[in-house]
Image: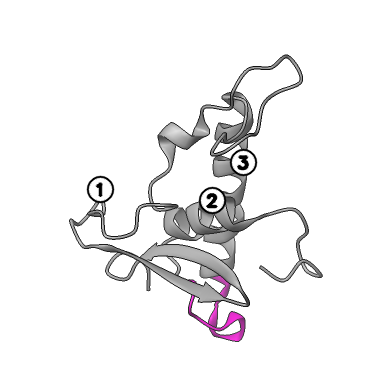
Amino acid sequence: MDQNIIAGIGNIYASEILYKAKINPLRRGDSLNNENIKSIIEATNLILNKSISVGGTSIKNHVQPDGKLGYFVQKLKVYGKTKQNCKECDNLISCETINNRSTYFCSNCQK
């Protein structure tokens, strides 16, 4: 979530992107191979496009210019799902704080 590398991807999207890419957020960046990086790029495109198509993610007070809510919150797989079961493997979703930011993940699906 280093904003010097890619800016504008916050906690929600970072958690969802890494879940989709099957990458554990606790992994060091220098441990990623080309296949991992390709998976993250593909997941980023997919997650951001899905979110845009439904107006973003309204968790607390985000609304569109026309006043409508963003409905991507209904499609979240891990963000905010602490102690709920992963939809893929039934493992409990975990939450860790990294650089004062919460990240959610499935330790079984994400390696």
Query: CA separation, marks 2 and 3?
Result: 8 Å
Q: Under tag 3, what secondary structure?
A: helix
User: Which residue has dot 1 on it?
Assistant: 87
Q: Under tag 2, what secondary structure?
A: helix
For the N terminus, the quadrant is bottom right
Crowding at dot 1, Cα within 10 Å, few <14 / some 14-19 / many 20+, comes out as few
* Dot 2 amino acid type: Ala
Residue 20 is situated, as x and y percent measured from the top left of the image, at 44, 53
Observer able to see residue 103? yes
Is 30 situated above or below 109? below
Observer able to see residue 24? no
Query: Which of the pair 35/81 is nearer the observer?
Result: 81
* Dot 1 amino acid type: Lys
Mark carried by residue 70:
none
Mark carried by residue 43:
2
Query: Which of the pair 54/46 is nearer the observer?
Result: 54
Q: With 22 as the anchor, is 43 left or right in this view?
A: right
Q: How is the image coloured?
A: one colour
Residue drawn at x 55%, y 33% as measured from the top left: 50
Crowding at dot 3, Cα within 10 Å, few <14 / some 14-19 / many 20+, comes out as some
The answer to which of marks 2 and 1 sits earlier in the sequence is 2
Query: CA separation, marks 1 and 3?
Result: 20 Å
User: Which residue has dot 3 on it?
Assistant: 48
Q: Under tag 1, what secondary structure?
A: loop
**Mark 2 against mark 1, which lies toward the viewer?**
1
Is 48 situated above or below 14? above
Asked if residue 63 lies in the magenta stretch, the reply is no
Tell me which corner region of the image, top left, top right, bottom left or bottom right, holds residue 60.
top right
Residue 57 is situated, as x and y percent measured from the top left of the image, at 57, 36
Residue drawn at x 22%, y 54% as measured from the top left: 85
Which region shows up in magenta?
25-34
